[in-house]
Image (cartoon, helix red, strand yellow):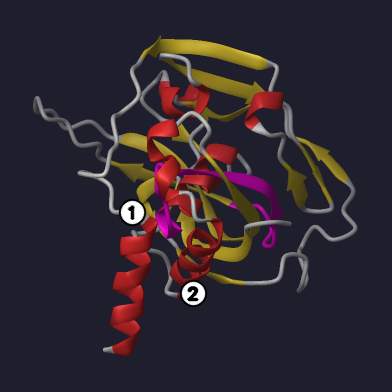
Amino acid sequence: MRNSIEFTVTGHYALFTDPLSKIGGEKLSYQVPTYQALKGIAESIYWKPTIILYIDAVRVMNPIRMESKGVRPLEYGGGNTLANYTYLRDVAYQVRAYFEFNEHRPDLAHDRNENKHHNVLKRSLKAGGRRDIFLGTRECQAYVEPCVFGEGTSFYDGYGDIHLGTMIHGLNYPDETGRDQLEVRLWNPVMSNGIIEFDRPEKCQKVRTISEMKPKTFNRENVLSIDELYAQLEEGDKG
């Protein structure tokens, strides 16, 4: 696949929160990561507003296990609330992702150098990402490294199809859709032998508007061009 990367992400805990569980102040994780959570991980490896990262597929490597913990949520107004959060435990996923240029950003057309973006993306993955990696929430720290998608043994090899019901697919931001609103996408994933192949965002039929939102403005003054970034990396390698 063009402009793609394949990586493994692992962690002791993950919390891909089912929003229905938040009503009573508790948090319960989905059984598998959402598209948006994996996109966030990919964007922590490398992100620029010039490109949009897409998640093609995820492979669940370890058995799905859950663990509940009593936690004290941070309450800025005071209080001593005890909540119950249910995490996924000992997780490992193989992810296949790729990028395309953001056609809703004509102001950044000067930054569209496909080869350099791909090289920096692969270099950033090899270094473990340009930002901290998390699995759903900040307390669930994770680690990424390159892999070959499909290699190795998954607990769900030969397991057949598992229907996961209605889940959040991800969020539509105005700078990626051209619409001045924040939207949420829903879908009904099926995990086949441990692999979930994601629909592209525009293919999701169940879309709900959350709120009005304007896209953030980027320009040459607040975004380092790929040529400048690439030059900095090359200079760092020489040093």
Of 93 and 80, nearer the camera is: 93
- Which residue: 58% across, 72% down? 146
User: Residue at image x 23%, y 31%?
Assistant: 81
Which residue is drawn at the image coordinates 43% and 27% (left, top)?
A: 175
Q: Secondary structure at mark 1?
A: loop
Q: Nearer the viewer, residue 65 or 156?
A: 156
> Where does the magenta region start and end?
44-65
The disc labelled 2 sits on which kind of residue? Lys
Name the quadrant of the C terminus. bottom left
Q: Under tag 2, what secondary structure?
A: helix
Crowd around label 2: few <14 · some 14–19 · many ≥20 (10 Å): some
Quarter of the image where one finds residue 22:
top left
Question: What crowding class fits label 1: few (fewer than 14 Cα within 10 Å), some (14-19), or many (20 or more)?
Answer: some
Residue 129 visible? The answer is yes
- Residue 4 on image: x %, y %: 64, 58
Left of 175 or right of it: where is 131?
left
Q: Position of residue 74 (x, y in %)?
A: 19, 36
Which residue corresponds to the image point at 49% horizontal and 59% vertical from the top-left? 117
Q: Is residue 34 above or below residue 139?
A: above
Precedes in sequence: disc 2 or disc 1: 2
Q: Which residue extends farthest front?
A: 110
Q: Which residue is mark 1?
A: 225
Mark 2–mark 1 Cα distance, whole angstroms, equals 21 Å
Q: Quadrant of residue 188?
A: top right
Instruction: Report x, y in % for residue 103.
Output: 53, 33
Residue occupied by mark 2: 126
> Is residue 60 on the magenta stretch?
yes
Q: Which residue type carries mark 1?
A: Ser
Q: Is residue 236 above or below residue 230?
A: below
Q: Is residue 76 left or right of residue 35?
A: left
Residue lying at the far bottom of the rendered structure: 239
- Residue 34 visible from this viewpoint: no
